Image (tube, rainbow, N blue to C red):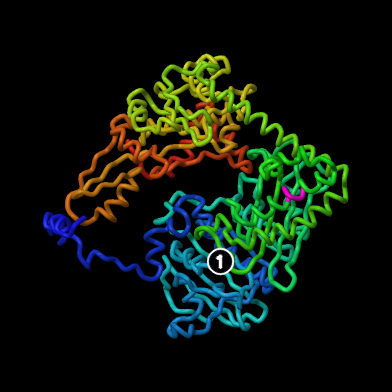
Amino acid sequence: MTHSAKQSLFDNMTDDNTSDYSAKDIEVLEGLEPVRKRPGMYIGGTGSNALHHLFAEVLDNCMDEVVADHADRIEVVVEADNWVRVTDNGRGIPVDPHPKFKDKSALEVIMTTLHSGGKFSSKVYQTSGGLHGVGVSVVNALSMHLEVEVARNKQLYGQKFSKGVPTGKLQTLGAAPNRRGTSVRFQPDPEIFGSSLKFSPKRLYRMARSKAYLHRGVEIRWKCDPELCEGTDVPTQASFHFPGGLADFLKERLGSKTTITDNAFSGQVERPGKHGSVEWAITWTPQGFGEADGFINAYCNTVPTVEGGTHVAGMRAALTKGLRAYADSAGMSKRAALITADDVMATAGAMVSVFITEPEFQGQTKEKLASPAATKAVESALRDRFDHWLAAAPVQSSKLLEWVIIRAEDRLRRRKQKEVSRKTATRKLRLPGKLADCSNNSNEGTEIFLVEGDSAGGSAKQGRDRYTQAILPLKGKILNVASATKDKILANQEIKDLVQALGVGIDGQFNIDDLRYERVIIMTDADVDGDHIAALLMTFFYICMPGLIEKGHLYLALPPLYRLSQKGKSAYARNDAHKDELLAGPFSTGGKVELSRFKGLGEMMPAQLKETTMNPKSRTLARVTIDPVTRATTDALFETLMGKNPELRFAFIQEHAGEVAELDL
């Protein structure tokens, strides 16, 4: 662009809007204000997972004292009115004046200042789960009330906070000659999490118990208010101490399941000359584990890394290379060449825990370990020991190798069948006439949108990517399969169309390998009717195709309910709460806001639907999952809400009516 062209461009611009944006519009958030303003940035949201993450942060701090050999006991107390207290017998948070903030104690600095603590270097904690210095301060910021007591130097100190702000100075509470450590008692703020969201004693119990498996020397004592535990299988008092570590943990998870080998492959390696360790316990079962074949529970410095990471990569590499090497010695190298890490881990129940200095995580919630050194550390720790384990029991090892090879051969056979069937799908399958299929011959990267009615289907067909996205319009509300007979289900035309489009069959004929799409996406209106239709579809999949959910193929689209416009800028809101957040935030200044409410997906222009709900680069999807731990509870809930007995629904509504804050009518 020439200088004259640039000048012409600027000459055509006016200053009409500059007065609406000035220095007064620049906010500076201090202290813990950013946490309360945007809690999702620190704990991933404001739902149940985020609420329980507060407990995890406090418990992790106690475990860091245990791992550093300064504590050997933790006490968790779940109290009435949504209070939780976590206490350790460690060194206690320092209470002397901080050298940089001389008018504040070190305890107050830690509780009220982001990125403060003793874990940024390895001088105080060789390994720890909290490295960002935001954990306990975030808990403080998001708590209506928080109380800290520190027993240190035979004295007891205490300080109280509300919404992250001290309600008084650090107090000396008296002598404590036989006590040491830190106690944090807190009550989450209902302004952040809502008044109806409460801690689940069952979930807290499971979280505390799992921590005890991760360090053999710790004892975790559990206490729970009897009224909170009533009607659950959670005890009011318990003590957790597991000398066998992860091997004990795996044994509990296995239950009565049979395994391919007689013994699990387990062990622990301390890194000589360095502070750190690797512990593992792995087995294989032909029965599956009820969760997408196998499972991997991975931890770093006692923090659960639910998305795995570099330590899991090292474990997968060690097992795969070890089995291939064993195959070479057994004269089966040609068949074993087919083996991949996915074949090895497909039916494995695996647990791995690492303690490393200054780990790198992805995100504040630490769901994935990113430290490159962890891959090599875990692989080198497991590899030689796995070779010795295989050599020590050749009969069992050969059985395991044969099992993995069969899995690999079956995978390749099914892939070839799928390639052939996919290429000729339109000729071999009787597909529904209203299905707008995608053109990709493979199911990899493809997705089918289940939409409500022909109007929404028309917009979706125009807004889709024809190569990877298929559209199946469904007529109104499908049959509630939870209260229908099998004959009625099989005779329902909408269900027939859905089953034929997916290609996997139903009930006894279900085969996940025949699924024609990688993702099945329920896309309904963002209103009560849309929620009802989505609930009916999820009921169908949960009862008739549970494997599709267990394998992670079912999703919910999250279309917007509102569009906000103001002087050339626009945004979409998912619901009323999101709308209010936008009105109070980026649309709070600048004049009148035009607000339009979408009555349904069919009212949206195809370009709008694509931008907000269908484009993988800009949309948000919610994956539908089944927690195997609470499967029985989920079954009972489906029976209550969707089953044949209306009395159960009526009783449920009566019991929970008080929790409904607002109805969108």
Looking at the rendering, the stretch of residues picked out in magenta corresponds to: 319-323
Tell me if I can see residue 644 in this picture. Answer: no
Tell me if I can see residue 314 in this picture. Answer: yes
Q: In the picture shown, does residue 293 fall above or below 224?
A: above
Q: Quadrant of the N terminus?
A: bottom left
Q: Identify the element where label 1 is drawn.
A: loop
Tell me which secondary structure the magenta stretch mostly adopts.
helix
Residue lying furthest front = 2
Q: Determine the residue positioned at 75% across, 37% down.
A: 405
Residue 438 in percent (x, y) is at 45, 28
Residue 309 located left or right of residue 501: right
Is 487 covered by the magenta stretch? no
Q: Determine the residue positioned at 17% across, 57% down.
A: 6
Check disc 1 and report the residue beneath it.
130
Is 321 covered by the magenta stretch? yes
Residue 142 in percent (x, y) is at 44, 61
Q: In the picture shown, does residue 372 fall above or below 408?
A: below
Q: How many marks?
A: 1
* Of the pair 561 and 272, the residue shown nearer to us: 272
Residue 150 located left or right of residue 34: right
* Residue type (three-letter) at the residue carrying disc 1: Gly
Q: Quadrant of the C terminus?
A: top left
Residue 353 in percent (x, y) is at 68, 58
